[in-house]
Image (spheres, rainbow, N blue to C red):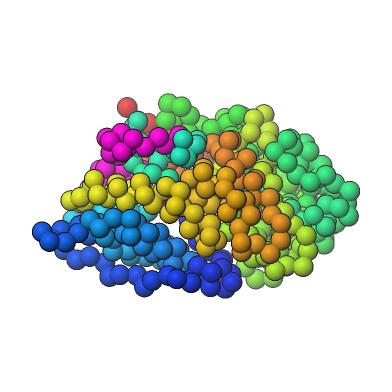
Amino acid sequence: MSTKRTLGASARMVAIAAAGALTLTACAQGGGNDESPSGPTTLKMVVWGGDVDKATYQERVDLFEASQDAITIDLQLIPGDQYEQKVQTMIAGGDGPDILEVAEGVNVYSSKNQIIPLDDLIASAGLDLEERFGPVGTLYSYQDSVYAIPDRSGAMIVYYNKDLFDAAGVEYPSADWSWEDAHSAMEALTVPGEQWGYAGAGWWPQWWSLAYQNGGQIIDDEGRPAVDSPEVVEALQWANDLAYVDHVVPTPAEYADMGPDMGGDPAFAAQKVAMNTTGFWAISGLLEVDFNWDIAPMWGGEQQAVSAFGSGLAISRDSESPEQAFQAIDFLTDAEAQAVIIKNAQDVPANLEVQQSEAFLSPEWTTREVNMGAFGESAAFVFTAPLVPEWNEMQAAFDDNLGTFWNEGGDAAAQLAIIQTQLESIIQPAS
């Protein structure tokens, strides 16, 4: 899961999403809601993102408000880099929103009792999380309670350049590939100094996928850090060796030579790399390119496992109308409102019915045939990421200790041993 999905939307998609969108209403003042004896309950809802997100959430809110006359929603969009700080300030001041968007940091909130458990509300509504969302239904949980309902949830997928594959005589990628198959393809697709087989796996959703494919875990079933296990070490070393031993992935220096701000997504669009593992958002930048490309589920190792990017909707402790807030969340994550997400090319809806619909599999905004079914196929093997309360500290430990490793190469076992020690001092297993 990642907020990165909100970046890089093309002007074409902004125009699609903006059509019919209404201006955001002002944030409600003086608390999480306002209920008049003669009028509806007004809920405050906060989300992050840009223009496409703003238009899409508002269109969904409009649908909810049109479905009944007892509840209205004041929607506030906050830029992603300011979101967490602003929401924490709201809650600290006793003026938290009724509904808030959450992602990997969900349990930063739940562990501080800043958002409420939803189990009783889920039961009262008769909502079957597995039926509606599949494996990610209970993703946003803490100590056996659900704290957010999935809203957006698309697996990491493989983008591949069909022209380069055809020229090299390599079969297209699929979920049936092993690490060996992927590696052989990367080698066949690499032209030294000019073209690389793969964009790399240095981002945590990428190399964590490899770790889980290899039978490893970042946090074990008892809640303890497990990053120094042989399975995780092997996966991280394999990912790093692709650049520094096998030379089938560009090094950071080679990316820099391609141009400013170059990484996997733009390098794939420039046909510098033949494969890239990333999220839904990369589609927007490929709709007008002049080469043939498609998407596929990620390959597997000892088992199939892949990261998912997404977000959920939670209710803050400051809400004076949690039942009404949950009614809104239930509607916003059901099929009608979720269909707006793909209509506006915002993201992958978490709702499985929508993921399996013709509107998703053949969206009107596509300019070429795209295997959108790759997302649904991948949903079957999304692994449950460890959304620990210490999420931010955990990510900082990885970033602080793997910078040189990714920039220059190195020994995965040595770096992960350091990180393991740090995580043992940071992460407190649930009692």
Q: Residue furthest left?
A: 37
Q: Is residue 42 left or right of residue 13?
A: left
Q: Is residue 308 left or right of residue 362?
A: left
| 32 to 21, vertically: above or below | above
Image point (63%, 54%), residue name: 362
Q: How many marks?
A: 0
Where residue 20 appears, as percent x and y from the top left, is 45, 71
Image location (x, y in percent) of residue 337: 43, 54
Q: Quadrant of the C terminus?
A: top left
Which residue: 73% across, 67% down?
Answer: 289
- Camera sees residue 85: no
Q: Quick check: 216 above or below 92?
A: above
Residue 19 pos. (x, y %): 48, 72
Q: Is residue 177 visible?
A: yes
Observer-nearest of 172 and 232 = 172
Residue nearest the observer in this picture, 301 or 224:
301
Whether residue 309 appears in magenta in the rendering, the answer is: no
Q: Nearer the viewer, residue 68 or 86?
A: 68
What residue is drawn where x is 31% and y is 59%? 65
Residue positioned 71% across, 61% down in the render = 368
- Which x, y percent locates residue 213? 63, 34
Quarter of the image holding residue 290? bottom right
Q: Which residues are magenta?
A: 102-130
